[in-house]
Amino acid sequence: MVFSVPILTGTNFSEWKEKVEFTLGVLDLDLALREEEPTQLTNDSTEEEKAFHKAWKKDNRLSIMLLRMTIASDIKTTLRVVEKAKAYLAAIEKRFKTADKSLAEKLVADLTTMKHDGTRSMHEHCIVMTNLSAKLKGL
């Protein structure tokens, strides 16, 4: 399952993020991405609060590990290490938002300038345009 997550290279952020979130969800390790960090435990904490705190810490640690192992080394070294998976994912997203923006611009240019030139069937041409449109919607 983890091996289906592509390595983040900088040009595949949207796909990478989608697969990371899906993988963490399937593995039931996305608690730290869905919920804020629980308050510190006290002597008055209930067993339920203790269990939630323990589960959140475990999911947070494993989520950060998965995020780090699916990022290319040259990118990983430029990111500061944080203690919370949600913050780490947000920092990565902020860094690659501009890459997605330039990719979107390229897809729009391709889509608006593409003409049927007769080298392939009209059906294939429409499929290529539909695929470009779907990629653009994903961004």
Image (cartoon, rainbow, N blue to C red):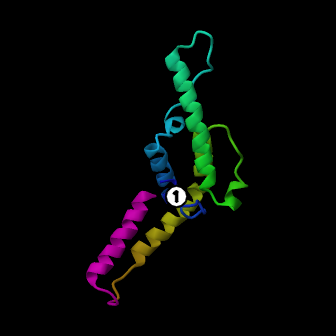
Residue 137 belongs to magenta span = yes
Amino acid residing under circle 1: Phe
Q: Residue at x 53, y 13 (%)?
A: 46
For disc 1, the neighbor class at 10 Å (few under 14, some 14 to 19, many from 20) is few
88 sits to left or right of 4: right
| Dominant secondary structure of the residues highlighted in magenta in the image | helix
44 sits to left or right of 123: right
Q: Is residue 33 above or below residue 123?
A: above
Secondary structure at badge 1 equals: helix
Residue span colored magenta? 118-139
Q: Residue at x 37, y 63 (%)?
A: 134
Q: Residue furthest bottom?
A: 119
Q: Is residue 116 above or below residue 137?
A: below
Give residue 138's position: percent from left, percent from top. 42, 58
Give residue 25's position: percent from left, percent from top. 45, 43
Give residue 135's position: percent from left, percent from top. 42, 64
> Which residue is under mark 1?
3
Q: Is residue 51 above or below residue 92?
A: above
Give residue 31's position: percent from left, percent from top. 50, 35
